[in-house]
Amino acid sequence: MNYGLGHRLSILIADDHHLVRQGIRSLIVQAEISNAIFDAENGEQAWRCIQSIQPDIAILDISMGKMSGLDVSHKIKQRDLNTKVIFLSMHEDIKIINRAFAAGAHAYLPKRDAFNTLTQAIKQVHTLIYQKETHLTH
């Protein structure tokens, strides 16, 4: 679904737990947010996917094997890519949350609240994408 905001979203889900990825995918599909959903089980796979597919949104876990979500987000920011980052993590320490935003996060959600807050966060980030596209075309 495009919520009247221009185009369908492409979304990458990166988490080292398969069940978490599947749960997030199911939530996104059920909410009709996207039908272009990709997944990665570690930060290295996520970074390769982002480079090749350039999804609109990357939903990243902080702690993943091979490369952390923070490192992936920092690379996105360094290279000024258009992919927007939503962190979904069990970490609720303010220092880690601050590091996530410093690395370029557009949203940070605790995993314990994910099923109540994730779809709304995706919609809000989608609005940011749409506003940027509208600004660039006018």
Image (cartoon, grey):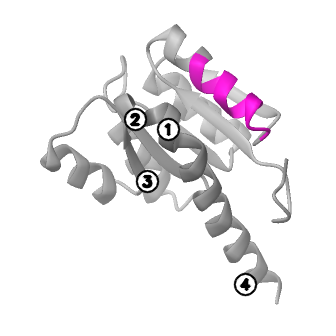
Q: Indicate the quadrant containing the C terminus: top left, top right, bottom left or bottom right.
A: bottom right
| Whole-number angstrom distance, CA of label 1 to CA of label 2 | 5 Å
Q: Earlier in the sequence, mark 4 or mark 3?
A: 3
What residue is at 41 percent from the left and 41 percent from the top? 87
| Whole-number angstrom distance, CA of label 2 to CA of label 4 | 33 Å
What residue is at 49 percent from the left and 43 percent from the top? 117
| Whole-number angstrom distance, CA of label 1 to CA of label 4 | 31 Å
Camera-side mark, 1 or 3? 1
Q: What kind of residue is marked 2?
A: Asp
Residue topped by disc 4: 135
What residue is at 54 percent from the left and 23 percent from the top? 45
Q: Are marks 2 and 4 in contact (CB under 8 Å)?
A: no
Q: What kind of residue is marked 1?
A: Asn
Residue topped by disc 1: 116
Q: Secondary structure at mark 1?
A: helix
> Please, which residue is most extreme toward the front here?
116
Residue topped by disc 2: 113
Callout 1: few (<14), some (14-19), or many (20+) C-alpha neighbours within 10 Å?
Answer: few
| Whole-number angstrom distance, CA of label 2 to CA of label 3 | 13 Å
Camera-side mark, 2 or 4? 2
Q: Secondary structure at mark 2?
A: helix
Camera-side mark, 2 or 3? 2
| Whole-number angstrom distance, CA of label 4 to CA of label 3 | 22 Å
Q: Are marks 1 and 2 in contact (CB under 8 Å)?
A: yes
Q: Earlier in the sequence, mark 1 or mark 4?
A: 1
Q: Compare residues 75 and 27 and report the one nearer the observer.
A: 27
Callout 4: few (<14), some (14-19), or many (20+) C-alpha neighbours within 10 Å?
Answer: few
**Left or right placement of residue 108 versus residue 95 in this view:** right
Residue topped by disc 3: 107
Residue 12 vs 3, above or below: the answer is above
The percent position of residue 75, horizontal first and vertical second, equals 43, 48
Q: Secondary structure at mark 4?
A: helix
